[in-house]
Image (cartoon, rainbow, N blue to C red):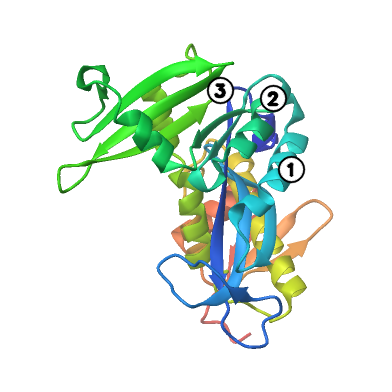
Amino acid sequence: MTKNASYLSETGNIVVDIDQTGLIANGKTYQCATKGYFSKKKNQKGYQVSAAFGGGEHSETLGLYLDPGNTQCNHRFEDLLKDVVQKGPHAAKEKRLILRIDSGYGSDENIQLMENKVLFLAKAYSTIRAANIGKTIDKEDWDDIDGCVDTHELPSIDGIRYILVRTLTRIGGFEYTMLISNIPVSQMSTHDLFHFYNKRQTIEAFFKMCKHTYHIKNLRTRKFEGIYVFLWMVFITHNIISRMKKITFNDSKLEGIGTKTLVEKLGAIVAQVKETAESFIVTLPQICSLAHKFVEYIKAKYEQLSFLTSD
Protein backbone atom coordinates (compact mmCIF):
# COMPACT_ATOMS: atom_id res chain seq x y z
CA MET A 1 0.00 0.00 0.00
CA THR A 2 1.40 3.37 -0.97
CA LYS A 3 1.19 6.26 1.44
CA ASN A 4 -1.09 8.26 -0.83
CA ALA A 5 -3.39 5.36 -1.73
CA SER A 6 -7.14 5.77 -1.26
CA TYR A 7 -9.11 3.62 1.16
CA LEU A 8 -10.30 1.34 -1.66
CA SER A 9 -6.71 0.67 -2.76
CA GLU A 10 -5.58 -0.71 0.58
CA THR A 11 -4.50 -4.31 0.90
CA GLY A 12 -6.58 -6.75 2.89
CA ASN A 13 -10.34 -6.55 3.33
CA ILE A 14 -12.10 -3.28 2.46
CA VAL A 15 -15.21 -2.72 4.58
CA VAL A 16 -17.90 -0.34 3.31
CA ASP A 17 -21.08 0.59 5.17
CA ILE A 18 -24.20 1.92 3.43
CA ASP A 19 -26.88 3.83 5.31
CA GLN A 20 -29.30 6.75 5.21
CA THR A 21 -29.88 9.71 7.52
CA GLY A 22 -32.44 12.50 7.52
CA LEU A 23 -32.01 16.27 7.38
CA ILE A 24 -34.95 18.28 8.69
CA ALA A 25 -36.02 21.32 6.65
CA ASN A 26 -39.48 22.55 7.70
CA GLY A 27 -39.52 25.89 5.92
CA LYS A 28 -42.09 26.22 3.15
CA THR A 29 -39.52 27.38 0.60
CA TYR A 30 -37.11 24.44 0.83
CA GLN A 31 -37.14 22.84 -2.62
CA CYS A 32 -38.16 19.16 -2.77
CA ALA A 33 -38.49 18.87 1.02
CA THR A 34 -41.25 16.42 1.95
CA LYS A 35 -42.60 14.71 5.04
CA GLY A 36 -40.88 11.43 5.81
CA TYR A 37 -39.27 9.32 8.50
CA PHE A 38 -36.83 11.21 10.74
CA SER A 39 -35.47 9.37 13.77
CA LYS A 40 -37.22 10.48 16.99
CA LYS A 41 -38.93 13.30 15.09
CA LYS A 42 -42.57 13.16 13.97
CA ASN A 43 -44.43 15.16 11.34
CA GLN A 44 -41.26 16.76 10.01
CA LYS A 45 -40.27 17.72 6.47
CA GLY A 46 -36.84 17.48 4.96
CA TYR A 47 -34.43 15.33 2.97
CA GLN A 48 -32.79 11.91 3.08
CA VAL A 49 -29.01 11.58 2.67
CA SER A 50 -27.79 8.19 1.44
CA ALA A 51 -24.08 7.44 1.73
CA ALA A 52 -21.42 4.78 1.31
CA PHE A 53 -18.69 5.02 3.92
CA GLY A 54 -15.37 3.21 4.19
CA GLY A 55 -14.80 2.88 7.89
CA GLY A 56 -11.17 1.84 8.04
CA GLU A 57 -8.40 3.33 10.16
CA HIS A 58 -8.64 6.46 8.01
CA SER A 59 -12.27 6.71 6.93
CA GLU A 60 -13.40 7.85 3.51
CA THR A 61 -16.75 8.71 1.98
CA LEU A 62 -17.39 6.83 -1.26
CA GLY A 63 -20.85 7.87 -2.41
CA LEU A 64 -23.61 10.39 -1.74
CA TYR A 65 -27.20 10.97 -2.81
CA LEU A 66 -29.78 13.51 -1.67
CA ASP A 67 -33.51 12.83 -2.00
CA PRO A 68 -36.83 14.18 -0.67
CA GLY A 69 -37.74 13.16 2.87
CA ASN A 70 -40.23 10.45 1.85
CA THR A 71 -37.57 8.46 -0.07
CA GLN A 72 -36.98 4.94 1.23
CA CYS A 73 -33.37 3.86 1.73
CA ASN A 74 -33.75 1.03 -0.82
CA HIS A 75 -34.25 3.62 -3.53
CA ARG A 76 -30.50 4.39 -3.62
CA PHE A 77 -29.04 0.99 -2.75
CA GLU A 78 -28.29 -0.13 -6.30
CA ASP A 79 -26.73 3.25 -7.12
CA LEU A 80 -24.45 3.12 -4.07
CA LEU A 81 -23.52 -0.50 -4.74
CA LYS A 82 -22.53 0.44 -8.30
CA ASP A 83 -20.51 3.42 -7.04
CA VAL A 84 -18.55 1.31 -4.57
CA VAL A 85 -17.80 -1.49 -7.05
CA GLN A 86 -16.71 1.00 -9.73
CA LYS A 87 -14.35 2.73 -7.30
CA GLY A 88 -12.87 -0.52 -5.98
CA PRO A 89 -12.99 -2.97 -8.91
CA HIS A 90 -9.82 -4.82 -7.90
CA ALA A 91 -10.97 -5.30 -4.31
CA ALA A 92 -14.36 -6.54 -5.56
CA LYS A 93 -12.80 -8.95 -8.07
CA GLU A 94 -10.40 -10.32 -5.46
CA LYS A 95 -13.27 -10.83 -2.97
CA ARG A 96 -11.81 -8.32 -0.52
CA LEU A 97 -14.63 -5.76 -0.72
CA ILE A 98 -17.18 -6.34 2.06
CA LEU A 99 -20.49 -4.47 2.17
CA ARG A 100 -22.13 -4.18 5.58
CA ILE A 101 -25.79 -3.13 5.64
CA ASP A 102 -28.69 -3.01 8.10
CA SER A 103 -32.16 -4.47 7.80
CA GLY A 104 -33.48 -1.54 5.76
CA TYR A 105 -31.42 -2.88 2.86
CA GLY A 106 -31.68 -6.57 3.72
CA SER A 107 -34.35 -7.59 1.20
CA ASP A 108 -34.05 -10.71 -0.95
CA GLU A 109 -33.67 -8.49 -4.04
CA ASN A 110 -30.69 -6.65 -2.56
CA ILE A 111 -29.07 -9.92 -1.48
CA GLN A 112 -29.27 -11.10 -5.09
CA LEU A 113 -27.76 -7.82 -6.30
CA MET A 114 -24.75 -8.24 -4.02
CA GLU A 115 -23.99 -11.95 -3.99
CA ASN A 116 -22.08 -12.09 -7.27
CA LYS A 117 -20.43 -8.68 -6.96
CA VAL A 118 -19.07 -8.32 -3.42
CA LEU A 119 -18.79 -10.07 -0.11
CA PHE A 120 -21.54 -8.84 2.19
CA LEU A 121 -23.05 -9.04 5.64
CA ALA A 122 -26.65 -7.91 5.96
CA LYS A 123 -29.37 -8.02 8.58
CA ALA A 124 -32.46 -9.59 7.02
CA TYR A 125 -35.39 -7.27 6.38
CA SER A 126 -38.01 -9.60 7.86
CA THR A 127 -37.93 -10.28 11.61
CA ILE A 128 -41.03 -12.47 11.28
CA ARG A 129 -39.15 -15.03 9.22
CA ALA A 130 -36.30 -15.03 11.77
CA ALA A 131 -38.75 -15.51 14.67
CA ASN A 132 -40.62 -18.33 12.94
CA ILE A 133 -37.38 -20.24 12.32
CA GLY A 134 -35.81 -19.33 15.66
CA LYS A 135 -38.68 -20.77 17.67
CA THR A 136 -38.06 -24.18 16.09
CA ILE A 137 -34.41 -24.34 17.23
CA ASP A 138 -33.76 -26.53 20.28
CA LYS A 139 -32.35 -24.83 23.37
CA GLU A 140 -29.08 -26.78 23.30
CA ASP A 141 -28.41 -25.77 19.68
CA TRP A 142 -27.98 -22.07 20.52
CA ASP A 143 -24.47 -20.74 21.11
CA ASP A 144 -24.16 -18.19 23.91
CA ILE A 145 -22.50 -14.84 23.10
CA ASP A 146 -22.68 -12.85 26.32
CA GLY A 147 -25.48 -14.27 28.43
CA CYS A 148 -28.19 -12.19 26.75
CA VAL A 149 -27.51 -12.99 23.09
CA ASP A 150 -27.36 -16.39 21.38
CA THR A 151 -26.58 -17.36 17.80
CA HIS A 152 -27.35 -20.35 15.63
CA GLU A 153 -26.10 -20.84 12.09
CA LEU A 154 -28.40 -22.63 9.66
CA PRO A 155 -27.08 -24.78 6.82
CA SER A 156 -25.80 -22.60 3.98
CA ILE A 157 -27.56 -22.53 0.63
CA ASP A 158 -25.48 -21.97 -2.52
CA GLY A 159 -22.73 -20.32 -0.47
CA ILE A 160 -25.12 -18.01 1.43
CA ARG A 161 -24.93 -18.27 5.22
CA TYR A 162 -27.88 -17.62 7.56
CA ILE A 163 -27.20 -16.78 11.21
CA LEU A 164 -30.10 -16.52 13.63
CA VAL A 165 -29.62 -14.10 16.53
CA ARG A 166 -31.75 -14.46 19.66
CA THR A 167 -31.73 -11.55 22.13
CA LEU A 168 -33.18 -11.74 25.65
CA THR A 169 -35.63 -8.88 26.33
CA ARG A 170 -36.25 -7.06 29.61
CA ILE A 171 -39.46 -9.00 30.22
CA GLY A 172 -37.80 -12.38 29.73
CA GLY A 173 -38.85 -13.10 26.16
CA PHE A 174 -36.75 -13.25 23.01
CA GLU A 175 -36.36 -11.09 19.92
CA TYR A 176 -35.10 -12.72 16.75
CA THR A 177 -33.12 -11.34 13.85
CA MET A 178 -31.16 -12.95 11.05
CA LEU A 179 -27.79 -12.12 9.54
CA ILE A 180 -27.16 -13.12 5.92
CA SER A 181 -23.67 -13.34 4.44
CA ASN A 182 -21.55 -14.89 1.72
CA ILE A 183 -18.32 -14.46 3.71
CA PRO A 184 -16.73 -17.93 3.96
CA VAL A 185 -16.60 -19.71 7.32
CA SER A 186 -12.83 -19.95 6.90
CA GLN A 187 -12.72 -16.15 6.95
CA MET A 188 -15.26 -15.42 9.71
CA SER A 189 -16.92 -17.74 12.19
CA THR A 190 -20.51 -17.35 13.34
CA HIS A 191 -19.42 -15.31 16.36
CA ASP A 192 -17.04 -13.25 14.22
CA LEU A 193 -19.89 -12.29 11.88
CA PHE A 194 -22.05 -11.22 14.82
CA HIS A 195 -19.37 -8.93 16.24
CA PHE A 196 -18.37 -7.70 12.79
CA TYR A 197 -21.93 -6.60 12.07
CA ASN A 198 -22.11 -4.61 15.30
CA LYS A 199 -19.11 -2.57 14.18
CA ARG A 200 -21.22 -0.89 11.51
CA GLN A 201 -21.79 1.84 14.08
CA THR A 202 -18.90 3.58 12.31
CA ILE A 203 -21.25 5.03 9.67
CA GLU A 204 -23.71 6.10 12.36
CA ALA A 205 -20.84 7.88 14.12
CA PHE A 206 -19.88 9.49 10.79
CA PHE A 207 -23.42 10.84 10.28
CA LYS A 208 -23.36 12.19 13.85
CA MET A 209 -20.04 13.92 13.15
CA CYS A 210 -21.44 15.39 9.92
CA LYS A 211 -24.32 16.93 11.84
CA HIS A 212 -22.47 18.14 14.93
CA THR A 213 -18.92 18.84 13.67
CA TYR A 214 -19.43 19.68 9.98
CA HIS A 215 -22.88 21.16 10.83
CA ILE A 216 -24.78 19.83 7.83
CA LYS A 217 -27.98 20.34 9.84
CA ASN A 218 -27.57 24.08 9.22
CA LEU A 219 -28.61 24.23 5.59
CA ARG A 220 -26.97 27.15 3.78
CA THR A 221 -29.59 27.47 1.07
CA ARG A 222 -33.16 26.49 0.30
CA LYS A 223 -32.32 25.32 -3.22
CA PHE A 224 -32.17 21.54 -3.62
CA GLU A 225 -29.12 21.60 -5.88
CA GLY A 226 -27.38 24.06 -3.57
CA ILE A 227 -27.90 21.74 -0.58
CA TYR A 228 -26.60 18.82 -2.64
CA VAL A 229 -23.45 20.76 -3.59
CA PHE A 230 -22.92 21.77 0.04
CA LEU A 231 -23.10 18.12 1.13
CA TRP A 232 -20.61 17.12 -1.54
CA MET A 233 -18.25 19.82 -0.28
CA VAL A 234 -18.57 18.43 3.25
CA PHE A 235 -17.89 14.87 2.10
CA ILE A 236 -14.90 15.95 0.00
CA THR A 237 -13.56 17.99 2.92
CA HIS A 238 -13.85 14.96 5.18
CA ASN A 239 -11.85 12.89 2.69
CA ILE A 240 -9.16 15.58 2.47
CA ILE A 241 -8.87 15.74 6.26
CA SER A 242 -8.74 11.95 6.49
CA ARG A 243 -6.09 11.78 3.77
CA MET A 244 -4.09 14.56 5.44
CA LYS A 245 -4.06 12.63 8.71
CA LYS A 246 -2.89 9.54 6.84
CA ILE A 247 -0.20 11.16 4.66
CA THR A 248 0.90 14.51 6.10
CA PHE A 249 0.68 13.44 9.74
CA ASN A 250 2.00 9.92 9.11
CA ASP A 251 4.10 8.69 12.07
CA SER A 252 3.53 11.94 13.96
CA LYS A 253 1.69 12.84 17.15
CA LEU A 254 -1.08 14.32 15.03
CA GLU A 255 -1.83 11.12 13.09
CA GLY A 256 -4.38 9.96 15.65
CA ILE A 257 -5.90 13.36 16.36
CA GLY A 258 -9.68 13.51 16.18
CA THR A 259 -11.45 15.21 13.30
CA LYS A 260 -13.54 17.23 15.77
CA THR A 261 -10.34 18.65 17.29
CA LEU A 262 -8.90 19.52 13.90
CA VAL A 263 -12.07 21.23 12.71
CA GLU A 264 -13.05 23.08 15.87
CA LYS A 265 -9.65 23.98 17.32
CA LEU A 266 -7.19 24.11 14.46
CA GLY A 267 -9.79 25.24 11.95
CA ALA A 268 -10.69 28.22 14.12
CA ILE A 269 -7.14 29.64 14.06
CA VAL A 270 -6.73 32.59 11.68
CA ALA A 271 -3.67 32.16 9.46
CA GLN A 272 -2.04 33.80 6.48
CA VAL A 273 -0.44 31.54 3.90
CA LYS A 274 2.13 32.95 1.47
CA GLU A 275 3.60 30.88 -1.32
CA THR A 276 7.21 31.48 -2.34
CA ALA A 277 9.33 29.87 -5.02
CA GLU A 278 10.69 27.32 -2.55
CA SER A 279 8.08 26.94 0.16
CA PHE A 280 4.91 28.08 1.87
CA ILE A 281 5.10 30.57 4.72
CA VAL A 282 2.31 30.24 7.27
CA THR A 283 1.87 33.20 9.59
CA LEU A 284 -0.14 32.48 12.71
CA PRO A 285 -1.04 35.47 14.90
CA GLN A 286 -2.13 33.15 17.71
CA ILE A 287 0.39 30.40 18.29
CA CYS A 288 -0.82 27.40 20.28
CA SER A 289 0.72 23.97 20.78
CA LEU A 290 -1.62 22.41 18.23
CA ALA A 291 -0.73 25.07 15.65
CA HIS A 292 3.00 24.52 16.31
CA LYS A 293 2.64 20.79 15.66
CA PHE A 294 0.51 21.33 12.56
CA VAL A 295 2.99 23.74 10.94
CA GLU A 296 5.90 21.49 11.85
CA TYR A 297 4.43 18.47 10.16
CA ILE A 298 3.38 20.22 6.96
CA LYS A 299 7.01 21.34 6.72
CA ALA A 300 6.16 25.02 6.35
CA LYS A 301 7.98 28.01 7.79
CA TYR A 302 6.24 30.11 10.36
CA GLU A 303 6.91 33.18 12.41
CA GLN A 304 5.18 34.45 15.52
CA LEU A 305 3.82 37.96 15.39
CA SER A 306 4.18 40.08 18.47
CA PHE A 307 1.14 41.89 19.79
CA LEU A 308 3.45 44.58 21.19
CA THR A 309 4.46 45.98 17.80
CA SER A 310 2.87 49.09 16.45
CA ASP A 311 2.16 47.51 13.02
Estimate the spatial distance between the alpha carbons at disc 1 and disc 2, rounded to whole Å: 16 Å
Choose the circle earlier in sequence order: 1 or 3: 1
Q: Nearer the viewer, mark 1 or mark 2?
A: 2
Q: Position of residue 105 (x, y in %)?
A: 56, 44
* Kind of residue at disc 1: Asp
Report the number of numbered marks: 3
Q: Residues within 10 Å of mark 2 (few under 14, many from 20)?
A: few
Residue with the most extreme top position = 186
Choose the circle earlier in sequence order: 2 or 3: 2
Choose the circle earlier in sequence order: 1 or 2: 1
- Please give the label number shown on residue 83: 1
Q: Nearer the viewer, mark 1 or mark 3?
A: 3
* Location of residue 83 (image quadrant): top right
**Vertically, is 199 above or below 277?**
above
Dot 3: element? loop
Picture residue at 47% right of the left edge, 52% below the top: 204
Q: Is residue 78 left or right of residue 140?
A: right
Residues 81 and 54: in front is 81
Q: Position of residue 126 (x, y in %)?
A: 46, 42
* Kind of residue at disc 3: Asn
Residue that badge 3 annotates: 182
Estimate the spatial distance between the alpha carbons at disc 2 and disc 3, rounded to whole Å: 9 Å
* Kind of residue at disc 2: Asn
Residues 32 and 240: in front is 32
Residue 37 in view (yes/no): yes
Dot 1: element? helix
- Please give the label number shown on residue 116: 2
